[in-house]
Amino acid sequence: MKRIFWMLVIGGTAVVGFQWLTAPDVVDPQQRRQLMRERYYSTPAVQPPFATETREPCSNRVAHKQPLFGDLHVHTAYSTDAYAFDTRVTPTEAYRYARGGAVLLPPLNGDGMGTRVLRNEQPLDFMAVTDHAEYMGEGSLCLDPAQQAYSTLVCKVYRGDLKPPVSPVMQPLIRMLAFVIYGKERPASVCAADGSACIERSESVWRDIQLAAELAYDRSSECRFTSLVGYEYSLAEKSSNLHRNVIFANATVPPLPLSAKEAPQPSLLWQWLAQTCLDSATGCDALAIPHNSNWSSGRMFFPEYPGAETPAEKRDAAVLRQRIERLAEVMQVKGDSECRRGLYGVVGSADEQCDFEKLRAPDEVAEDCRDGVGEGGMMLKGCLSRFSYTRYGLTQGLAEHKKLGVNPFEYGLIASSDSHNATGGDVDEEQYDGAHGMDSDAAKRLIKEYDVPGGIATGSPLRYNPGGIAGVWAEENSRQSVFAALKRRETFGSSGPRIVPRFFGGWDLPDDMCGEDLARQGYAHGVPMGEVLPPRPESSDAPAFVLSALKDPRGNQLQRLQVVKGTMRDDGQMQETVYDVAGYAAGEASVDTATCAVAGPGRSSFCTRWVDPDFDPERAAVYYLRVLENPSCRWSAWQCLRVEGERPAACGDPDIPQIIQERAWTSPIWYYPNT
């Protein structure tokens, strides 16, 4: 078996090697299905005995809401890929870091401890640890010498006790593949013939994650930090990303986190959440947040309803998706998922800002998936699709609403980090410390590309970025208030800086809203980001919007406010329009990449009222606000300036951008014609 595994990772025969290694070692499918019914579907959500939702009233409560910043996508050593990359930070330590503490990051010393101290100088307001449900039990069993699984081949490879003859940069990837090669199955040698050992250990690990969130939650009247219980559901279909982060409203959660092993379609996840949580009469509530649609080969926002044939069945499926999936993650370390230029079926503005932080180069020549889907997106291969980007998912939702009366893609927007160092909110370009244990120094982060043996994936550390941050408008920093903001989609995302955007729409917004009374008037006369405009009065020609933004006190000056609008044309094409509403033109501000000094005009704040000049009352539309900072140095430019010794070849690579234009996106506001 050992020889076969080395052939797998060296020879590149991924499929043959997978079959040889795993065929005798997979959980019995029939027993597994029976166990799944017994353990995942028979028990509703419950509040563990160590948890409570009792708390002191928050002393800082704002009726018209305040901006709070957080991260809803953070991995710790409880995720097998993070552990394989030498991350040893626990959920408890991750929450401590989020609150302003320090953690130890790789490289590891002889005792397996991190040697690099990282302290959080800008604490978060809220966070969820979202470790992968997949392999949660397997990874824990492999690290426990008291378990029979400990001595198995797969566990020895995972721990690094067996090292194949590949380069040091490949070692953690091979350790991660110890489980990945099992695909949608589980190793019987680790999990037992029916999978019960891994299910039972997953339950134990899940309790530890809940306990860490319980201990981190600030229940004092100061309300400094909110912890939310969560996990990641990590489905891949034909090497295409369909991952979701599942976030719970409170401590009442299902006894086990449902993974893609048990639910190989997103609709099964939504049905399980409805059954065991939302409809269980236990007080449980939850959201599933798609992320990295840019890796999905068009599958994330493709308009399909598996298993539904009649219009009524499709409508029911759309209602369920809209109920569970209220938000989408527009950016994280693995790239921007807002938009991409030149895609089939999209016409309108030439938006150069769509070139922002693309894992696949903006000028890459690739086949377009057109009206279908592709495969290989997680390997940065295969066709490109408009259904891989949130802007076009939002626009496609207008067509679905017209057909079904329900919009399954009525998403609010957030951003997050996807840190596999357990360092939520560590998203500063100048101080980027890497997102994985394996990129623990600048030289490793400045590797342009490497291929995982067997063609299973393509790594691109230099194309990665520090990730983003999530924002909510909430009355106070409590679970109840933060989750309510997430659920009503009064949210925004940032590429890193703590920009504060606000976006209201309505039919009779006052002309003088830009002032201290902005929020009160916005709620009184219109709707905030994340809402649908009320029916159009006969006296109104077009909706008005009020846009405002404040710069990050530690960040760069703001350049522009833009409104992005999406509509569906009669010929089925998606119409995108980007309006420069306030600020300065591109090119007026600049950055010297030799020193990273910035120059040129900018503003610390903007506020303006705008009316859609192209409004058609007969055509549905979706609008969101995008805020652009002035240009600044990308993290890679900063590190090329500071790297010691010989500069990596990537520092002179003209294909790697040296400049970044940080930004924020608000959740949309929707308009549907009166019916």
Image: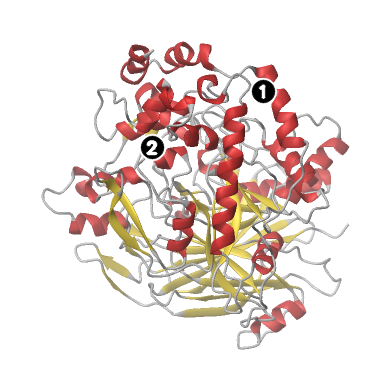
Q: In this orientation, which residue lies closer to the viewer: 443 or 136?
A: 136
Quarter of image, res 386: top right
Q: Which residue is mark 1?
A: 32
Q: Residue at x 37, y 30 (%)?
A: 175
Q: Residue at x 73, y 24 (%)?
A: 34
- Can residue 286 be seen from the camera position used here? yes
Q: Residue at x 65, y 41 (%)?
A: 256
Under circle 1, the secondary element is helix
Amino acid at pointer 2 = Ala
Amino acid at pointer 1 = Arg
Under circle 2, the secondary element is helix
Give above or below for 20 relative to 501.
Answer: above
Q: In this orientation, which residue lies closer to the viewer: 413 or 98?
A: 98
- Can residue 658 be seen from the camera position used here? no
Q: In this orientation, which residue lies closer to the viewer: 72 or 365?
A: 72
- Mark 1 to mark 2: distance in Å? 26 Å
Q: Where is residue 476 shown, x and y percent of the image?
A: 64, 75
Quarter of image, res 250: bottom right
**Are the residues at dot 1 and dot 2 in contact (C-beta closer than 8 Å)?**
no
Q: Residue furthest left?
A: 645
- Colour setup of the view: secondary structure
Q: Residue at x 21, y 54 (%)?
A: 640
